[in-house]
Amino acid sequence: MKRTFADLHLRLNLKDSATASRIVNKAATLGYGLIAASFLPETRENEKVEVQSICSEAKIDFASRVDIKPRTQEDLTHYLRRLRRRYEVICVACENKEVARKAAKDHRVDLLNFPLLDFRRRFFDRAEAELASKGLAALEIDVRPLLVLEGPARVRLLSNLRREAAIAREFHVPVVVSSGAANESLLRRPRELAALAYLFGLDEVQALEAVSQNPVSIVKRNRQKLSPDFVAPGIRVIKEGKKVEKS
Amino acid sequence: MQVDSDGAPTPKEFMDAVWGAVTKLYGEHGASLTGLALISYNAEEKTAVIRTALAALDIVRASLASITSVASKAAAVHVTAVSGTIKALHEKL
């Protein structure tokens, strides 16, 4: 079966639809079957629809994603209640340990993202991984900083990513590798993203899963949950019967 | 591979970018293991064929993906096919 490749983190400028269109078309040319553009919680529905139409013109599957940056656990719960039914992918930018722990164990969170340059605030340790392994959250790694950074900053980032990828593997937490690209020049083919994942210790199979199976399964799972036929995990309406009338 | 760039880099500029990326990521020792050599370069179509040791394929793939500029112009290098022989490579393309 042909593999579907996905990039769940495109940072499109919604005010510049021409550039957004170029990025989406480029992603389609590079071989992606599914992309997700990140929106803010305040994004209006019409902006989402606009990106959706750009993607359907480019004949590429589109998943809506929201990036939230809660400051406290209560903030996170509030965001999740408000946004879970509106977006197919929810990514939590974990700015502190309290939020990171809550996000890891909450089944409504799909992706955990950590500040890439502030190494003291990368909270993906063994405790976090253990919580994430019991939930549904995956660790997201953007490759953009690997392309943009140079010298000691890149060395430190690679070292951190290698440690986190090893922990994720140990606790069976899925890893999702995304581009995080805001312009065309930082877009890479799926296999090139996988090659970059080799830099932080993923082998070929794991790296290819991180750009195909892992992100695709997140979107598939959430689409099922958002479908009107969904009742509970494992239960869905297949066919509605006739209304029984009381005699 | 396909060079995705605004300008039209010369073969030397292209190979400088490739060597630069390998050396930056893996150092001189790593670069010495790759056995990199330019086989052909088409400046009009911006395509290139390079040779590398099979054992260093992952190193070269990662390095090529990390290229962001060629001759000081924004660029990306996309691998279109990998093959053991040049004949098989042309058949693939």
Image (cartoon, grey):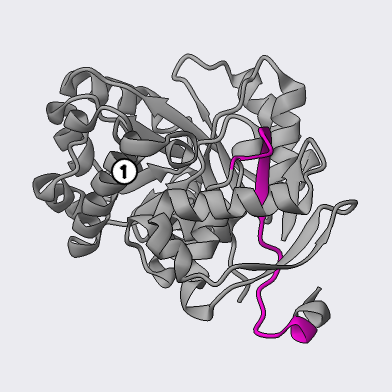
Residue drawn at (41%, 63%) of the image? B30
* Residue A11, x across and y down, in percent: 55, 29
Residue A194 x %, y %: 48, 59
The residue that label 1 is drawn on is A155
Q: Is residue B87 magenta?
A: yes
Q: Chain of mark 1?
A: A
The amino acid type of the residue labelled 1 equals Val
Observer-nearest residue: A213 or A206? A206
Q: Is residue A29 visible?
A: no
Identify the residue at image location x=69%, y=28%.
Answer: A20
Q: Is residue B26 left or right of residue B71?
A: left
Q: Above or below — where is A52 with respect to A244?
A: above
SS for callout 1:
helix
Is A185 on the left-hand or right-hand side of A54? left
- The answer to which of A25 and A111 lies nearer the viewer is A25
Question: Which region of the structure is painted magenta?
Answer: B68-88
Occupied quadrant, residue B91: bottom right
Observer able to see residue B86: yes
Mark 1 closeness class: few <14, some 14–19, many ≥20 residues within 10 Å: some
Which residue occupies the foreground of this view, A16 or A246? A16
In the image, residue B57 lies in the stretch drawn in magenta: no
Q: Residue furthest left?
A: A127
Q: Quadrant of the N terminus of chain A?
A: bottom right
Height in image: A95 above or below A223? above
Q: Which of A208 and A64 lies nearest the eye of the viewer?
A: A208
Q: Is residue B6 left or right of residue A243?
A: right
